[in-house]
Each structure stands twice: as C-alpha cells, then as structure tokens.
Image: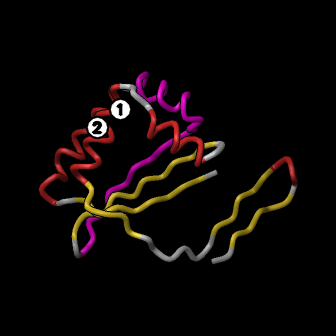
Amino acid sequence: MLSVKFYRVRPERLESLRSWLRELQTRRSEVIESFALEGTRSEVAFLIQAVDGPVLVWTSEAADLEVAAKEYAASTLPVDLEHRDILREALSGRIHPECLFQVFYVGFLRQPVVHTY
C-alpha cells in the first residue's frame, strides 16, 4: 500500500531538515533495519516551495501502513529517535489535500482496486 502525506515546513528549520534527509542517505543500513522492522518497502521525500512556504511531501510504501506506523512509533532505534525529533522540530502541521484519483493494482487478483473520493 502507498501513503502520500504533505506537511508544512518551518522556514527556519528547512536547512536542518534538508541536512537530515541527506544524512539519511549515508545511513542506509540503519534505515533498512528500520524498514525491516516496520515492513516498509520504500520512502521518498520531496520538497515543494509553495507560495506560503515550504511543503514536505512524504511517500511511504508498506505491506500494511498501520503496522508500519505503529512499529515506527514504538521504535527505539537511534535513527528513528533522531528522525522523530527532527521532524517534530521542522514540521508545523499536516496538509490534507483533496485526492482526486487513486488506483491500486493487486496483480494476484487480476483486477484493479479503485478508490473514489
């Protein structure tokens, strides 16, 4: 399952957020260890410079997003502890955009799963 979330970034914390996300690239083994515990397959982060300030777009793919979120929240891995602290400082709130289209193809069922909003 895929999750896409949008967050407002505090402008004064933007560079520390960028630095942290670059650092995560150098700590791949720790990130992969966290993913293994969560059941996460991949995560991708994008930054949008919106008119009213920076927006972080965070995508996650996991077999079960609820399980992944619970495991992450309970994790005591150093990389997860640091990640939570940095995001708490850098993000000022979640944005809930209107989702206009979403389809998941479940290959073994041979039919698409369509969600309408």
Position of residue 96 measured from the top left corner of the image (x, y, whole percent): 44, 71
Q: Residue at x 19, y 59 (%)?
A: 10
Position of residue 34 measured from the top left corner of the image (x, y, whole percent): 47, 29
Label 1 to label 2, Cα distance in Å? 5 Å
Res 85 → quadrant: top left
Q: Is residue 29 left or right of residue 7?
A: right
Residue corresponding to mark 1: 25
Q: Amino acid at mark 1?
A: Gln
Q: Residue at x 58, y 77 (%)?
A: 100
Give the secondary structure at mark 1. helix
Residue corresponding to mark 2: 22
Residue, far left: 12
Please say if the residues under marks 1 and 2 sit with CB atoms less than 8 Å apart: yes
Q: Residue at x 39, y 50 (%)?
A: 45
Position of residue 2 measured from the top left corner of the image (x, y, whole percent): 59, 53
> Badge 1, how many Cα within 10 Å: few under 14, some, many 20+?
few
Give the secondary structure at mark 2. helix
Q: Is residue 8 left or right of residue 72?
A: left
> Badge 2, how many Cα within 10 Å: few under 14, some, many 20+?
few
Would you place residue 33 above or below residue 88 in this image?
Answer: above
Residue, far front: 74
Q: Amino acid at mark 2?
A: Arg
Would you place residue 49 above or below residue 100 in this image?
Answer: above
Q: Residue at x 37, y 33 (%)?
A: 80
- The residue stretch that appears in magenta: 28-51
Res 27 → quadrant: top left
Observer-nearest residue: 33 or 88?
88
Would you place residue 99 above or below residue 2 in this image?
Answer: below
Q: Dividing the image into 4 quarters, which one contains the C terminus?
A: bottom right
- The answer to if 42 sits in the magenta stretch is yes
